Amino acid sequence: MSLLCLVLSLATTVIAIKVDFPCSNEIPKSLYHIWTSTGFSPEARNSTNWTWPLNLTRDERLGLALIGSLRGGALTHVRIHWLFDFITYNHDSAEETFNFSALDSTMSLLHQHNLSPSFELMGNPSGRLLLDDQMDQQLLRSLVLQAISRYQSKFGSDGVQLWRWETWNEPDLRMYWNASLPAYISYLKTVVEALTQAGLKVGGPAGLFRPKHRICWHALDEFAHLSQPEKKISFLSFHRKGKNSADEVIAGTQGLIKAIKFRYPNLDSIPISNDEADPLSGWWRPCDWHADVRYAAMVVRTAIRLLDDVAFLSNDNAFLPHAPHYFTQRTLLARFQQSESSTHFFLKPVAISLVLLSLLGEKLVPFTINESDDRLTIVSGSSFSDDGAFEGATVISFANETKECPYEAITVDLALHCEGSRCADDARYALFLLDNIQTNPERVWRERGSPAMPDAVLRRRMRDAQGPFRVVTSAPLTTSLTLTLRVPSVALVQVCSKREAMPGAPTNLTALHPAPGETLLVWSDLEVGTRCLLGYEIYSRNSSDATWTKLTQGSILTQWHHDAIEYEYQVHAVDLWKRHGYKSSIVTRRD
Ligand SMILES: *[C@@H]1O[C@H](CO)[C@@H](O)[C@H](O)[C@H]1NC(C)=O
Ligand SMILES: *[C@@H]1O[C@H](CO)[C@@H](O)[C@H](O)[C@H]1NC(C)=O
Ligand SMILES: *[C@@H]1O[C@H](CO)[C@@H](O)[C@H](O)[C@H]1NC(C)=O
Ligand SMILES: *[C@@H]1O[C@H](CO)[C@@H](O)[C@H](O)[C@H]1NC(C)=O
Ligand SMILES: *[C@@H]1O[C@H](CO)[C@@H](O)[C@H](O)[C@H]1NC(C)=O
Ligand SMILES: *[C@@H]1O[C@H](CO)[C@@H](O)[C@H](O)[C@H]1NC(C)=O
Ligand SMILES: *[C@@H]1O[C@H](CO)[C@@H](O)[C@H](O)[C@H]1NC(C)=O
Ligand SMILES: *[C@@H]1O[C@H](CO)[C@@H](O)[C@H](O)[C@H]1NC(C)=O
Ligand SMILES: *[C@@H]1O[C@H](CO)[C@@H](O)[C@H](O)[C@H]1NC(C)=O
């Protein structure tokens, strides 16, 4: 601990935050969950001698299952580079054919875990497309149209409606677009026309817009010269990162948006996205702050501060870390790969912070604060369930970029007003906290000597530290509560009125086995119908006629890790009033 931290701790400020949760549905402003996208580049594409078709590795598939099942809506989109390299081109047959087999299994995996791709139209089936001045535009158009119609018939037009189509990633870097500007412009024209022909829109140009790089500005020139660009372009995307700083991401994003809006007034109605909004470029760079709540708080701050500026943003953090940087690369998960068929994953605080954000409702609720403190970032949201029950939440992050300083604290007096009949009867609140003391699996691991192969006991302790930590499980709503936050922290206060219905059944319960003798259960809360849960209870039995044993009063996450493989599992939700919900279907071990 630095001396500076101790000195500052002498004066702990008290501030008052007041949130007036509405008593009616008439809240003017929507709270868009702009932060629900992540991204990565397939591991295999980085090997020096990769060949077509690209395919996901076992760990990449497990990683997607884990992040897809944090909680419904915590993450909705995954931006994946090089998807066209998952396709092969058949040279032999008289008819030109693409083979989508590897891409099909990848898209099905996303679908199975309730994720949609941000489908970058990037890569080159078997290297067949000439990405230069001789580009075969007919073949490129055919590839794009075949991909669209294939996945529309596989997942339905409604399913594919949620997908985000985007042009080639970072065309201003040679490692991505290694051809001329004219070749890029013909690529761009072709994909815009193809998407338009399919009745869809495309976003782009997903680039850096560095002063020396002209290619992305040329892309915007092209967009601006389209007739009715708003009917063809779904979003304008760019990448702005910080140098170990969320505030640099925020300022950089706002600055570039201003420049774009000034230069292209006729693109003004098109939504804008920073779809690589990372606090530091280079995902592989190990930094201690990537491991803990500092990174989580930076992601939360960036998302909340950019609510008025972008339609959505993405953090490029669905990569999997490599030894010995188990925690410290820019990832949502920590990974200890023991062998080809045995990997231990842990959720980093940044992943859990997305779970907390997902508990915010869809309407923005105003708040007042009696004193400003630049380390605070606050947002409040509410929604109503189908039967009119109220579900409100406030997220407060208290952090200062990459600083770790647990003796630097603030006391928050939080006044929650929820008036009217909706909140009158038996309203309850819950309080969750992420900080580097309670929820820091990396610290637990480090304090045990940072072993390359953590044993079962240590792994359990690390999982226990994943969070979110429940400060208050479920208590009658009081008008005022006090909480102390340390640098860095992310807290969530949830306020709920009682629904009539009990929670619905968890769906799509699936058992995976990341390591021998272990089970990872994942399920969906799409039909559970409420955010106000104590958590999920997990039951198992070792034969179909045995009685069920309760394994845990689990967390609010829609996944659970078991250090065993039982014959059958079943899950149900428990709400804040301790009412048990409908049971999921049973998942049975396949021998
Ligand atoms: C803000 O409210 C807190 C708690 O009520 C109080 O201790 C503090 O002095 C107030 N600050 C200002 C600037 O009024
Ligand atoms: C790609 O692989 C090389 C080793 O082959 C490694 O040094 C580098 O960090 C990797 N880069 C990325 C972006 O994965
Ligand atoms: C090249 O590819 C082969 C076959 O896929 C693989 O066995 C080998 O390890 C690879 N070599 C390198 C340097 O990646
Ligand atoms: C597509 O490729 C896969 C594996 O690469 C192969 O098993 C399959 O037979 C191919 N399909 C067609 C129609 O050629
Ligand atoms: C891609 O990987 C999946 C999962 O391991 C596998 O089922 C599929 O056959 C692979 N596809 C190809 C074309 O290699
Ligand atoms: C999930 O479960 C629901 C309800 O049982 C079912 O309709 C749906 O097809 C399942 N989704 C997937 C991706 O398996
Ligand atoms: C770009 O293409 C040239 C010519 O084909 C090749 O020599 C070079 O290695 C490529 N650069 C990258 C970064 O792929
Ligand atoms: C954040 O930390 C920096 C560097 O230690 C310090 O200069 C700055 O005053 C801190 N910000 C706040 C709001 O405390
Ligand atoms: C259930 O069966 C598995 C494998 O047969 C065994 O490892 C496990 O200990 C059993 N669990 C109980 C509770 O008996």
Image (tube, rainbow, N blue to C red):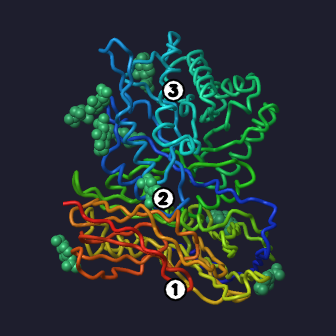
- Sequence-earlier tag: 2 or 1: 2
Per the image, label 3 sits on a secondary structure element best described as helix
Q: Which residue is mark 3?
A: 144
Answer few, some or many: residues within 10 Å of disc 3's Cα (few below 14, many 20 plus, some between 14 and 19): some
Query: Would you say residue 329 is visible in this rendering?
Result: no
State left or right for residue 278 relative to residue 251. Answer: left
Can you tell which quarter of the image residue 430 is in? bottom right
Residue farthest toward the front in the current orientation of the protein:
545
Badge 2: few (under 14), some or many (20 or more) residues near its Cα, within 10 Å? many
Say which of marks 2 and 3 sits in front: 3
Residue type highlighted by circle 2: His
**Res. 290 mark:** 2
Identity, as a three-letter code, of the amino acid under mark 1: Lys
Chain-order first, disc 2 or disc 3: 3
Asked whether 528 or 322 is in front, the reply is 528
At label 3, which amino acid type do we have? Val
Q: Residue at x 64, y 57 (%)?
A: 33
Q: Left or right? Give the position of 20 relative to 320.
A: right
Disc with the residue nearer the chain's start (1 vs 3)? 3
Q: In this figure, which residue is indicated by the disc labeled 1?
A: 578
Give whichever of 542, 12 is nearer the camera: 542
> What's the CA distance linking mark 2 and mark 1?
36 Å
Look at 68% across and 68% down and name the residue there.
Answer: 375
The quarter holding residue 346 reads bottom left
Q: Quadrant of residue 66?
A: bottom left
Q: Secondary structure at mark 1?
A: loop
